[in-house]
Image: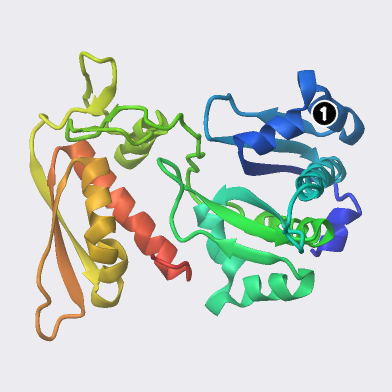
Amino acid sequence: MDSGVIEGGLNVTLTIRLLMHGKEVGSIIGKKGESVKKMREESGARINISEGNCPERIITLAGPTIAIFKAFSMIIDKLEEDISSSMTNSTATSKPPVTLRIVVPASQCGSLIGKGGCKIKEIRESTSAQVQVAGDMLPNSTERAISIAGTPQSIIECVKQICVVMLESPPKGVTIPYRPKPSGSPVIFAGGQSSSAAISPQLTKLHQLAMQQSPFPIAHSNQGFTGIDTSAQTSSNEMKIPNELIGCIIGRQGAKINEIRQMSGAQIKIANPVDGSTDRQVTITGSPASISLAEYLINARLSSEATGLPAN
């Protein structure tokens, strides 16, 4: 399958999720929704926009390939038009490229990058678009953002090629979609500590996914926020992680391991290297829910590293 097949209107229903800033979304919606209404009518695609009052919004395009790319082209043209308008009173001598982000399941990013980065290099060279796959998953999700910049035509061709890869390599496991949240929403993490970072109800789904068939207790705080009850019986699990992959679990200055501790509420200890051993022992202590979520998050990091994604 190649991008020409998609352009030819293969009878496939596609879904493309775009992550945009509020100002860009406002432009696409238009006064009284006239702009997005026109896009829906002329393209035949379903265009849904996530709820407002967030710094970022998700625009979902769904429908047959021809309708999707008609709607996508209209969105790109609108962004290009906005850039041209902003140049009118600008002292800048060169017009910046159109830039947008699409959101895809992290499990498909390995296929998109290819072994040693060969696939993404091929897409960059054949479309002349700048393409960058984020190294980390978006908050409280199993999705990553892909940034694409260039001329409208190069971006459209680039997204077509990305869609071909995604059709050929379906997502693995359950995908937890990224849902932008208002900035500064207070939340309760698994250990009960409060944070001003935005969190999604999807985190509960993440726990359920990690626990699979096993139910776990949920605690409700007086403020109405939901946390994971870590007062359940405490136990320990051990994992062995290859020495060469331990860095992607720890992260820069311990950032990744601390993030996993905070999200799961589990205590995680990494043993010192043992002479002659190719593995490091990781001990996870906490409630069954905390342990399962910690293991899930660690395995997600290992999986992204194994498929060639940057561990950051």
Kindly identify the residue that appears in the image at 40 percent across and 62 percent down.
Answer: 303
Marker count (numbered): 1
The residue identified by callout 1 is 35
At x 31%, y 33%, the residue is 196
Image position of 299 with respect to 285: above or below: below
In the rendered image, which quarter is residue 302 located in? bottom left
State left or right for residue 246 relative to residue 157. Answer: left
Residue appearing at x 20%, y 74% in the figure: 279
Residue 98 in the image, given as x and y percentages of width and height: 73, 54
Q: Which one is nearer the viewer's eye here, 99 or 170?
A: 99
Front residue (pair 237, 249): 249
Q: Is residue 164 visible?
A: no
Front position in the image: 206 or 263: 263
Q: How is the protein colored in the picture?
A: rainbow
Q: Position of residue 223 (x, y in %)?
A: 25, 15
On screen, 206 above or below 159? above
| Quarter holding residue 251 | bottom left
Give the quadrant of the N terminus.
Answer: bottom right
Q: Quadrant of the C terminus?
A: bottom left
From the top left corner, tell me how far across and down residue 94 is, in percent: 76, 63
Say above or below: 123 vs 3: below
